[in-house]
Image (cartoon, helix red, strand yellow):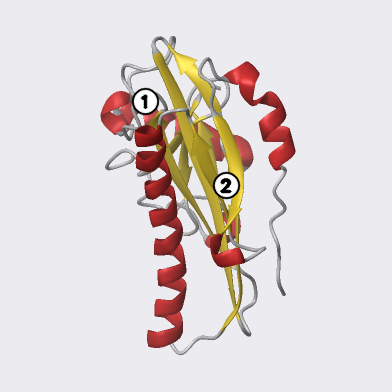
Amino acid sequence: MRKIFLLTLAAVLLTWQSLCAAQVVVESAKYNGSENLVYPIVKTGDAAVDEKINNRIVGELRDFIKGCHYAVQYDNRSIGGMYTSFEVPCNRAGNTVILSIIMTESVYYENAAHPTTFKRTLNFNAESGAKINHSYLTDVGSGNPKFELDNVTAKVRAHVEREGIHVFDDALPLKQLPEKFYFDEKLHVHFLFGHDEIAPYAAGIIDVDMDA
């Protein structure tokens, strides 16, 4: 059972200029020429900024590939396929152009019941190349709530109840902010929870829009 994630890059590029105040272009690249391992190359017009952002993107992709090969070497598994796709929402918040990279990574191990899928997120200031961390969340955009644990827990609880997702007994209240987050094209902040993080695998990757 193999699943290839199709990349609709054309749609991303068509809407890009209307979303970004800066002239930011995103191109699709193939890692070592592989049709299945694609990743974004960001071009801001500033070579130093591009290098910061793109080196980080490639580093994250290499971490995924390295992890898959680690499983082969130490867990006696055989890889049936590795696949990636990406989304790149972008918008301006005040004087900052925020660029989010959302990488979907999937690996299929032979004889497994299904592929194992992950999502990685990276957030950048597209004008400086600086990575945006959790500390930035309380200041970005207009109308965003303060990202205190109680507020995030309430949003997560409302989301899982609305979607009928049964979470683990000790999952809520949250003990810390979720590691993975991104900004969508409307500057809504989303938190991501991976498989088995707060709910059983069957619940999938849980995406909570904090501004919905």
Residue 165's tag is 2
Element carrying mark 2: loop
- Amino acid bearing label 1: Asn
Name the outermost residue toward the bottom: 76
* Residue 157 in sight from this viewpoint: no
Quadrant containing the C terminus is top right
* Residue 118 in sight from this viewpoint: yes
Residue 91 vs residue 55: left or right? right
User: Gap between marks 1 and 2, in whole Å?
Assistant: 19 Å
Question: In the image shown, does 198 or 2 lie closer to the viewer?
Answer: 2
Q: How many marks?
A: 2
Residue tagged 1: 151
| Quadrant assignment, res 122 | top left
Residue 112 vs residue 47: left or right? right
Q: Residue at x 38, y 55 (%)?
A: 59
Circles 1 and 2, Cβ within 8 Å, touching? The answer is: no
Q: Residues within 10 Å of mark 2 (few under 14, many from 20)?
A: some
Residue 131: horizontal and vertical position, in percent? 33, 35
Give the vertical position of 67 relative to 10 (above or below).
below
Q: Residue at x 46, y 59 (%)?
A: 196
Quadrant containing the N terminus is bottom right
Q: Residue at x 54, y 21 (%)?
A: 23
